[in-house]
Image: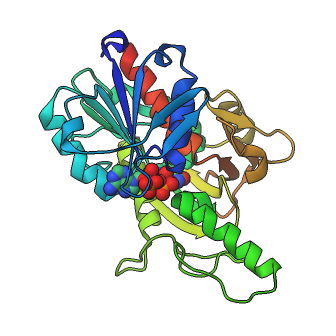
Amino acid sequence: MVLHKMNTIGIVGATGLVGQTLFEELLKMPACRSKNFVLFSSDKTAGHLCTLKGFRSKVENLTDNWLKRVDFWFFATPQHVAAHWIPSILNTRCANCIDGSSAFRLHKDIPLIIPEINIRQLTRANRLVASPNCTTTIALMALWPLHKVFHLKRFWVHSYQSASGMGNDGMRELEEQVKSWSEGKSHANVRNFHKPLAFNAIPQIGNLDADGVSEEECKLVLESKKILGDANLKIFANCVRIPVLRCHSMEINAEFDKRLNLDEAKMALKSAEGLCWYEEGYPTALEHSKQSACGVGRLRYDNALDNGIAMWVVGDQLLKGAALNMVQIFQHWINL
Ligand SMILES: NC(=O)c1ccc[n+]([C@@H]2O[C@H](COP(=O)([O-])OP(=O)(O)OC[C@H]3O[C@@H](n4cnc5c(N)ncnc54)[C@H](OP(=O)(O)O)[C@@H]3O)[C@@H](O)[C@H]2O)c1
């Protein structure tokens, strides 16, 4: 794919949290500044003016007329929107697309890419690439350097996820609830979460299946297996929503096939691309907000396991968990 032949880049979901972050990251690429960006949203905000870093544009409503007019598409919308439009885009013209939703992540012919891990799966022949679930990406960023040295046998992820994982309205809901509590009003307006989120912890993200597994937990397990290329890997996830505005935090326990030494594990994490190693202290959501790198600290042996370790991992789920990962895929793609 050649960038200079690409005139128009479309961002669908440009008014959303991921879409806005994505647009900001793309504008940091000098080669992209001369491109014609077209921003799309739902009927609700189409027609509004978007201004970002000197760029001003009216937000458009995506219709069939646009399908032939965009060379490269980014989708940062709910999954049903991506599932509706992407097949038409791929049928209409030879455009390429990166989807940040879950619509195509588990399709066997669609690469699911974290560049630091499996960029080799991306080829010139691909037209559509999926970017993984945010919790999956942050967890695998820390597990991958250890997997390369010690080989993963199984792992557990206990996540503490922020309100912005539910998009603009999730963040707004938490802010409203905190304000309402601080004004002494007991009722909480619950829209995006299963219980009031302010001053609370909710052990459910998405619907529960017949076995009691939540959608978020299911994504983490299935997407990790696909990215690591091991359908038999044993993975357990427990995903909890907490009243934090941005960044997902997680405790990861992992067991490896090879004999594990803590110093070697530290070296692997310290030298890994995209990670910030905490020799002392530990990362937190507030510190990692708007940071590209994911933070890892509190590495210790997990003596309940054979060759086991435990670690604390934090990442900005709007950046490495979504927008930044999509832009990194784009950068690799145009360099192929
Ligand atoms: N938030 C995260 O941490 C995160 C991380 C990884 C992946 N993701 C995934 O990224 C996607 C976007 O998430 P988000 O957090 O950015 O959500 P969001 O803040 O709610 O934004 C959703 C965007 O999609 C647009 N949209 C909704 N329906 C549409 C339609 N019919 N046609 C065109 N655009 C439409 C919205 O437009 P309006 O403004 O007009 O409503 C808005 O721009 C989701 O699939 C999500 O699962 C999110």
Instruction: Locate residue 9 relative to residue 196 in the image: left or right.
Output: left
The answer, for residue 275, to whether it is visible in the render is yes
Kindly indicate the quadrant of the structure image that contains residue 302: bottom right
Outermost residue to the right: 280
Instruction: Locate residue 137 relative to residue 189 in the image: left or right.
Output: left
Instruction: Locate residue 294 relative to residue 47 in the image: left or right.
Output: right
Q: Is residue 19 above or below residue 79?
A: above
Name the residue nearer the viewer: 143 or 305: 143
Kindly indicate the quadrant of the structure image that contains residue 72: top left
Q: Residue at x 55, y 58 (%)?
A: 168
Instruction: Locate residue 94 relative to residue 282 in the image: left or right.
Output: left
Outermost residue to the bottom: 186
Name the residue nearer the viewer: 93 or 264: 93
Outermost residue to the top: 4
Q: Residue at x 54, y 45 (%)?
A: 321
Residue 243 in picture, x, y percent from top left: 69, 68
The quarter in which the N terminus is drawn is top left
